Image (cartoon, rainbow, N blue to C red):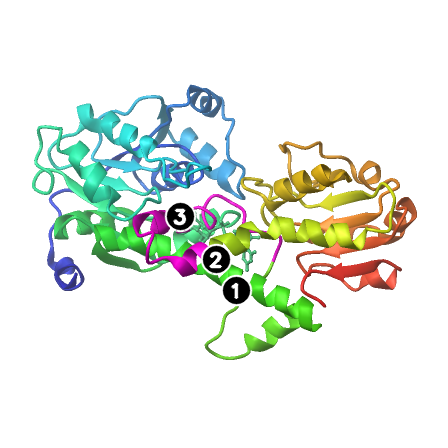
Amino acid sequence: MLYLRTALDNTRVDAMNRKICILGLGYVGLPTASMFATHGYDVVGVDVNEDIVKNMEKGNIPIKEPGLETLVLAALKSNRLKVQAKPEKADVFIICVPTPINEATKEPDLSYVKSATESILPYLEKGNLVVLESTVPPLTTQNIVIPILKKSDLKVGEEISVAYCPERVLPGKILTEFVKNDRIIGGLDKKSAQMAKELYGSFVEGNLHLTEITCAEMVKLMENTFRDVNIALANEFMKISERIGIDVWEAIILANKHPRVDIHRPGPGVGGHCIAVDPWFIINTDVEDTNLIKSARKTNDEMPGYVAGIVENELKDIEKPVVTVFGVAYKGNFRDTRQSPAKEVISILLDIGFEVRAYDPLVEDFPYELMPLDKALDGSDCILILANHRLFNNLDTKTIFSLMRNKKIIDTMNSLSSNWIENGFSVRKLGNG
Ligand code: SAJ
């Protein structure tokens, strides 16, 4: 909306908002709360999970992310950040709660957004700004959040300002990207957008781009859907390359030498809580016009099965094959296993009757047993790389060679150095026919 882009700098905001109440202390809420608390705001972090609150009070930070513990502890120590199970009065309320999808129906579950919005009603006052940060289907702020806010005695728009301000941070680089990335701010009106701009401008060094609320909701979904579709394209190119006998990794590097081409990387599937989920928010909004997006989701969802098929084929001549999975996180150099493709690949291989062992020194919590390296490799026939942790290239290949029964490697990430082949391993790369 043009008015937002042209008139904003002249809009006056009545008072500087100094106290923020943040609903949800997860991957986004906790860093956001700490960021504001270390940039001059008094922040009340609220989480309905009392264990999170109790642990945080003792200084146990529930989320592992580079630099986060130091930031949170500094915020708590400065007394600018406090955590509790219930909201309280503030100038700004920021909602950062999860928006999962129902795995069976792929329908969004907005119950946390609804309950968080309901929970602030008793504390709302004239002049407040309410910001939604959670990733949501388009029109959620307009059709769900604002009607709930209207249940207060205050006039939304006149007495309460509302904005939708999605995060864009990459897990593993959250704190840097919070500060450096440009950010989209969707305002209900000029005043709302300006208030949100001033708020985020306290720590964001990137540009703050203003628009209206539903556009901002859609922008967030478009970003992750672009990536999902692009990865599906890379996975399709990978399959074709296997069939025609070329190396897809080389082909992608060469295609990306074109100044307007940016093909992503193939892999064992799309994990995490965002890229594999957010396209469904668009699909559910318009089932008829989303054939490409649906097809991309299907292609990426089928990748664990495709990888399991390669393993089966490569080990078909081995009796009672033993596979050692390297890397169970949802991506390389990262400890998070949410929606990790490794879970599905392992489950399929176990169903086929393989013995599967898993090794990932970065990960602490995984549904299958994680073994020390020597135990995971003792008598194994094949290393299957599913997450490209840098540390795998620092391992002692000679010792590994001596531990294994067969010296096969299936590398789905094109991540191994030539050292492995030089030391006698037979390496089968995904996408190298
Ligand atoms: N993947 C590929 N090929 C690629 C890139 C990724 O197969 O070329 C796979 C990864 O291995 C992983 C999955 O995709 O399994 C997702 O990883 P990611 O690094 O692409 O993304 P996330 O989920 O960690 O974070 C994304 C980011 N979105 C974009 O880059 C557009 C991040 O900026 C968002 O803030 C985040 O989603 C979010 O919270 O929405």
Q: Residues within 10 Å of mark 2 (few under 14, many from 20)?
A: many
Q: Which residue is mark 3?
A: 280
Q: CA distance from mark 1 to mark 2?
A: 8 Å
Identify the residue at horizontal 13%, vertical 49% (top origin).
191
Three-letter code for the amino acid on which mark 3 is drawn: Trp
Mark 1 Cα-neighbour bin, 10 Å: few <14, some 14–19, many ≥20:
some
**The residue tagged with tag 2: helix, strand or loop?**
helix
Which span of residues is magenta-colored?
A: 267-296
Contact between labelled residues 2 and 1, with CB atoms less than 8 Å apart? yes
Q: Quick one: label 2 or label 3, which is nearer the N terminus?
A: 3
Q: Measuring from the top left, give residue 318's x and y in whole percent.
A: 87, 48
**What is the quadrant of residue 41 in the picture?**
top left
The alpha-carbon separation of the residues under discs 2 and 3 comes to 11 Å
Q: Which residue is mark 2?
A: 296
Residue 182 appears left or right of 162: right
Q: Quadrant of the N terminus?
A: bottom left
- Nearest to N terminus: mark 1 or mark 2: 1
| Residue holding disc 1 | 233
Is residue 278 positioned above or below 86 on the image? below
**Residue 409 relative to residue 189: left or right:** right
Sequence-wise first label, 1 or 3: 1
Q: For the residues marked 1 and 3, what is the alpha-carbon distance in whole angstroms?
A: 18 Å
Q: Give residue 378's position: percent from left, percent from top.
A: 87, 40
Q: Residue at x 18, y 32 (%)?
A: 148
The amino acid on which the numbered mark 1 sits, given as a three-letter code, is Leu
Q: Residues within 10 Å of mark 3 (few under 14, many from 20)?
A: many
User: Element type at marker 3?
Assistant: helix
Answer whether residue 247 is magenta in the image. no
Residue 100 in percent (x, y) is at 41, 38
